Image (cartoon, helix red, strand yellow):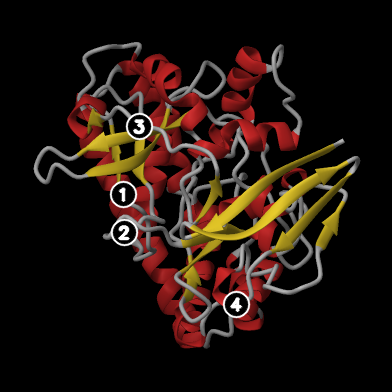
Amino acid sequence: MRDSLNVDIDKIFSGNIIKENSEYIFSYKTQDKNQFISLTMPVREKNYIGINLFPIFEMHLPEGYLLSIIKKHFSKILKTDDFGLLKLTAKNIKTRITYEGVDAYLSDSLSLESLIYPKDENLFDELVNRFALRSSLSGVQPKVLATVEDKATLSLDEYIVKSWGDDYPHLALNEYYCMSVLKKAGVRVPRFYISDDNKLFIMKRFDIKEDRSYLGFEDMCVLQAKQRDDKYEGSYEAIAKSIKIFVSPRHRKNALRQLFKMVVINSMVKNGDGHLKNFGLVYDGYEDINIAPAYDVVCTTMYIKKDIPALSLLGSKKWWNKKLLFRFALESCELTNKDTNKLYDECVIAIKEVSLEVQKDMKSYSNQEKIFLEELLEIFSNENSV
């Protein structure tokens, strides 16, 4: 059995991926070094061959909630193995990588105001029905990629919209305040909002340029040649090493500073889901590679009381104290003692400022939301024990 897809980079044909029997083969049909499909798969004459779908393609496959919805609707009529899913969703994958010979969808759009101020309590279900197959998003959390119109500029942008189920109550509030800590600490984050009813977390895609072309994006699973099922196998030292290998020299120091802050804040807010797919790089060609903005940060111990970090640091998957974090900064992030103290203090100040905002905002929340946020504040208040 042989199946294939043609692959474009920035709308120019680059090569094709073939599944033949139990093997995957990617062949470049270009000699242009800038038409690489991944930083880990440079243009060459020799084919790339593997028994698994290459991580750069697997990165775009739906997981969790979206995967279950798609399989429910299509498993009876189409193969929903990795290559089947890639073919099924290929025409709607809008990144630096697209697929030749498949038609782009004409997306109906929403207004940003309709997401932030929803009038329908079933809005997320409506979004899933309209956009599920168009959402090339990984991760287990219920989320969908929606096309949104800015009424002020009439421009169309893409936003990731996340909801929460019974197992993860108030997840939108959780992510909103954890992401606010990162933003206050000076970590680059995408533009984000929370809906007026606190049910939806809304985040703008960060890989689309002003001219509507796409930056390249690769998560750490791709950069470390791991499959998505291996996203919890690794270390933050390995992420730092990947940054040193791939990030452009002019961005490298700030990228390592940002990584240190992200690890510190993950520890402070007790985010046990900071796995390899939740760190990545963005690039505009080989000469401009940088760490991606922070995303998908929540306090997981609100739901899993004894949760542990997703990846190891200095050989440990227990929450790290300040001494270990400083050692990581010095040994892996190449920071000075002075820089480390400054960056760490900025994280502490940020979590205190967001805690004050939570206390102020709580006046307008429901009783259940207040109880949830009081527990979140208790975790935030323990940042000095890190």
Q: Residue at x 58, y 18 (%)?
A: 69
Tell me where residue 58 appears, x and y as whole percent.
68, 46
Residue 215 showing in the rendered view: yes
Q: Residue at x 58, y 24 (%)?
A: 65
* Element class at badge 3: loop
Drawn side of residue 18 relative to residue 146, left or right: right
Judged from this view, the residue extending furthest toward the right is 22
Foreground tag (2 vs 4)? 4
Whichever of labels 3 and 1 marks the residue nearer the N terminus, that label is: 3
Whichever of labels 1 and 4 marks the residue nearer the N terminus, that label is: 4
* Element class at badge 2: helix
Disc on res. 184: 2
Q: Which amino acid type corresponds to the residue marked 3 in the rendered image?
A: Leu
Whichever of labels 3 and 4 marks the residue nearer the N terminus, that label is: 4
Tell me where residue 348 appears, x and y as whole percent.
40, 62
Q: Which residue is mark 1?
A: 354
Q: Residue at x 76, y 30 (%)?
A: 81
Whole-angstrom CA distance, mark 1 to mark 4, is: 45 Å
* Element class at badge 1: helix
Whole-angstrom CA distance, mark 3 to mark 1, is: 40 Å
